[in-house]
Image (tube, rainbow, N blue to C red):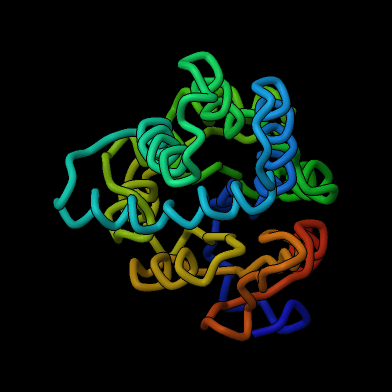
Amino acid sequence: MSASATTADLAEVSVIALDIFGTAVDWRTSVSEQVAQIAGRTNTELSPGRFTDEWRDRYLPALEAVNSGTQPWRTLDALHREALDDLLDAYDVGDDFDETARRDLVLAWHRLTPWPDVADGLARLRRRYTVVALSNGGVALLTHLLKDAGLPFDCLLSAEIWQAYKPQGQAYRAAAELLAIRPEQMLMVAAHTWDIDGARRARLRTAFLERPQEKGPNRTADRAADTTCDLAASSLTELAHVLGC
């Protein structure tokens, strides 16, 4: 369904759940800029964009290992650190990055710039809906990120609370349960097909938010055409307009 389609069947939705990484904030630009700064501080030559892409490539496999029980539960900060250590070794630059530099790199994911439409879109959506952040980020990470970015959510819901990462069904159902609503009363907004697919399987309503630049200039971002969703929009402000906000 496109953003111009009818929303009559979404009348029972009372909560908007917004994904954070890539959907609300530009992780790729923000992290690669900080990688460049920290690598410069250590006099290490590497491509910040490529390094960031390869770091992010380890994200979904790490979540799957935890969700499947192959690996024990760890916060996203811990998973980012493990992936970082492996990547630095793969680049053969591990000796260039001491504990302080590695910690600063992990904390780069706490400092991400919002997409330009997000602040206005959130303000408009909150006039009519309860709007929550629903993310795989840990509580500390999300608290720091949302405060630093100045994004006004009604509450933040982290996978850390129920120790199940999206796209596992429990991550979505638990969010609805905490807000005392049925899954179909929550609209999951995300820029990733895997997130939309997971939410749909958990019986949430779904809205795909197009972010063509999410993965940078050399990779193709996920598209609404590659999944099944109730709505699709090119910005959060457009989605707010379609929903009557």
Q: Is residue 150 left or right of residue 18?
A: right
Can you name the residue that lies furthest to the left here?
A: 69
The residue that appears at 74% across and 46% down in the rendered structure is: 29
Tell me how many marks there are.
0
Q: In this view, does 94 lie to the left or right of 22?
A: left
Query: Which of 42 and 162 lies nearest the eye of the viewer?
Result: 42
Q: Where is residue 73 in the image (x, y as percent from the top left)?
A: 22, 38
Inspect this view and state whether residue 243 appears. no
The correct choice, above or below, for 20 with respect to 38 in the image is below
Query: Which of 217 and 114 lies nearest the eye of the viewer?
Result: 217
* The quarter of the displayed image where residue 169 is located: bottom left
Q: Position of residue 166 (x, y in %)?
A: 38, 55
The correct choice, above or below, for 48 with respect to 172 in the image is above
Q: In which quarter of the image is the C terminus?
A: bottom right
The residue that appears at 78% across and 81% down in the rendered structure is: 4
* The quarter of the displayed image where residue 148 is located: top right
Query: Which of 103 and 115 lies nearest the eye of the viewer?
Result: 103
The residue that appears at 38% across and 41% down in the rendered structure is: 86
The residue that appears at 18% across and 57% down in the rendered structure is: 68
Q: Quadrant of the N terminus?
A: bottom right
Q: Is residue 15 left or right of residue 40?
A: left
Q: Where is residue 191 in the image (x, y as percent from the top left)?
A: 61, 63
Q: Where is residue 61 in the image (x, y as percent from the top left)?
A: 34, 58
Inspect this view and state whether residue 124 appears. yes
Query: Which of 224 and 1 lies nearest the eye of the viewer?
Result: 224
The correct choice, above or below, for 101 with respect to 181 in the image is above
